[in-house]
């Protein structure tokens, strides 16, 4: 959905704390590992689909070949 992720047009700055997102990182949730952003407020965006393990998510981030949303 347009504007749901930073890659599709969501703001690159958290409206609550003002943190500017300049890079993606590997994050974890109950559903698995994903590429996204977070700030002091918590998770902000999920840019990729979920991965079963951290290594696969990190490889996708490092190579840029990810299952982007």
Image: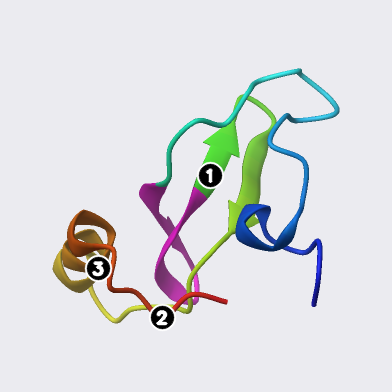
Sequence-wise, the earlier of marks 1 and 2 is 1
Residue drawn 69% across the image and 30% down it: 41
Question: In which image quadrant can residue 44 be found?
Answer: top right
Residue 49 at x, y = what percent?
48, 79
Residue 5 lies in the magenta-colored region: no
Which residues lie in the magenta part?
25-36
Badge 1 density bin: few <14, some 14–19, many ≥20, Cα 10 Å: many
- Measured from the top left, where is residue 33 in percent x and y? 37, 67
> How far is mark 3 from mark 1, CA to CA?
15 Å
Number of the label disc, if any, that sits on residue 67: 2
Q: Check residue 33 for magenta coloring.
A: yes
Question: Is the N terminus in the top left, top right, bottom left or bottom right quadrant?
Answer: bottom right
Q: Secondary structure at mark 1?
A: strand
Q: Which mark is residue 37?
A: 1
Residue underneath mark 3: 60
The residues bearing labels 1 and 2 have C-alpha atoms spaced at a distance of 16 Å
Element at label 2: loop
- Categorize mark 3 by other alpha carbons within 10 Å: few (<14), some (14-19), many (20+): some
Q: Main secondary structure of the magenta part?
A: strand
């Amino acid at each position: 959905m347009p504007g749901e992720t930073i890659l599709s047009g969501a703001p690159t700055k958290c409206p609550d704390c003002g943190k500017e997102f300049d890079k993606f990182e590997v994050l974890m949730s109950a559903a698995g590992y994903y590429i996204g952003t977070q700030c002091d407020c918590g998770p902000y965006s999920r840019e990729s689909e979920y991965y079963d393990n951290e290594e696969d998510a990190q490889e996708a981030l490092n190579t840029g070949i990810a299952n982007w949303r």
